[in-house]
Image (cartoon, helix red, strand yellow):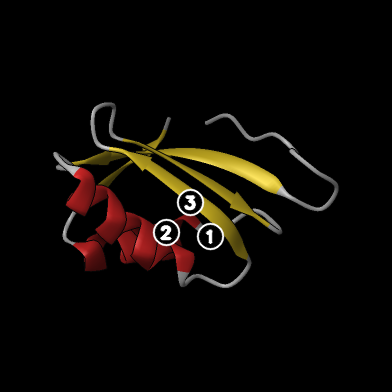
Amino acid sequence: MTAQTDTPGSVTAVYQVTGMSCGHCEGSVSSEITELAGVISVTAVAGTGEVTVVSEAPLDEAAVRAAVDEAGFELAGRA
């Protein structure tokens, strides 16, 4: 995983999600992860399976996994 601080107080994490194939998939994953406490922004790219999350603090991977599962996809881990 690449974790970097974009602005003071924010952390960027990149996750690998399997099963996304279209814009609707991207929206479903983004919507679920956005509901997690502290999430500032989410960018999902179906073509690569990468989901970039900017948050106020590092996120619990189990919470991210649960959100991705709720969207109907699988979190393969951090990219």
Q: Which circle's residue, 3 or 1, is located before the other in the chain?
A: 3
**Above or below — where is 66 with respect to 15?**
below
The kind of residue on which mark 2 rests is: Val
Mark 2 Cα shell of 10 Å, populated few (<14), some (14-19), many (≥20): many
**In the displayed structure image, the side of residue 40 where residue 19 appears, left or right:** left
Of circles 3 and 1, which is in front? 3
The residue tagged with tag 3: helix, strand or loop?
Answer: strand
**Above or below — where is 18 with respect to 72?**
above
Residue that carries the numbered disc 1 in the rendered image: 60
Of circles 3 and 2, which is in front? 3
Residue that carries the numbered disc 2 in the rendered image: 64
Identify the residue shown where x is 28% and y is 48%: 26
The kind of residue on which mark 3 rests is: Val
Identify the residue shown where x is 44% and y is 44%: 43
Measure the alpha-carbon separation of dots 3 and 2.
Answer: 11 Å
Mark 3 Cα shell of 10 Å, populated few (<14), some (14-19), many (≥20): many
Measure the alpha-carbon separation of dots 3 and 1.
Answer: 15 Å
Measure the alpha-carbon separation of dots 2 and 1.
Answer: 7 Å
**In the displayed structure image, the side of residue 5 where residue 58 appears, left or right:** left
The residue tagged with tag 2: helix, strand or loop?
Answer: helix
Q: Are marks 2 and 1 in contact (CB under 8 Å)?
A: yes
Residue that carries the numbered disc 3 in the rendered image: 42
Indicate the quadrant containing the C terminus: top left, top right, bottom left or bottom right. Answer: top left
Q: Which circle's residue, 3 or 2, is located before the other in the chain?
A: 3
Where is residue 2? Give x, y as percent: 58, 29
The kind of residue on which mark 1 rests is: Asp
Where is residue 56? Give x, y as percent: 71, 59
User: Could you say which quadrant of the image residue 4 lies in?
Assistant: top right
Where is residue 44? Give x, y as percent: 36, 43
